[in-house]
Image (spheres, rainbow, N blue to C red):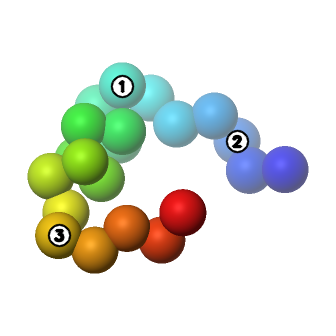
């Protein structure tokens, strides 16, 4: 399991055009 991401990391990923989930 990956370590939980912080709100900052989550927001940064939401702003990315490509998602890896």
| Pointer 1 residue | 7
Residue at the top extreme? Answer: 7
**Point 74% across, 50% down: residue:** 2
Alpha-carbon neighbours of circle 1 within 10 Å: few (<14), some, or many (≥20)? few
From mark 2 to mark 1, how far is it between C-alphas? Answer: 13 Å
Question: Who comes first in sequence, dot 1 or dot 3?
Answer: 1
Mark 2 or mark 3, whichever is nearer to me: 3
From mark 2 to mark 3, how far is it between C-alphas? Answer: 22 Å
| Pointer 3 residue | 17
Question: Who comes first in sequence, dot 2 or dot 3?
Answer: 2
Alpha-carbon neighbours of circle 3 within 10 Å: few (<14), some, or many (≥20)? few
Mark 1 or mark 3, whichever is nearer to me: 3
**Point 35% across, 41% down: residue:** 9
Q: Is residue 20 left or right of residue 14?
A: right
**Of 17 and 1, which appears nearest the observer?**
17
The tally of labels here is 3
| Pointer 2 residue | 3
Query: Where residue 11 sits: x, y (%)?
Result: 25, 37
């Amino acid at each position: 399991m990956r370590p939980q991401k912080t709100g900052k990391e989550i927001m940064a990923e939401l702003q990315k055009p490509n998602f890896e989930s």
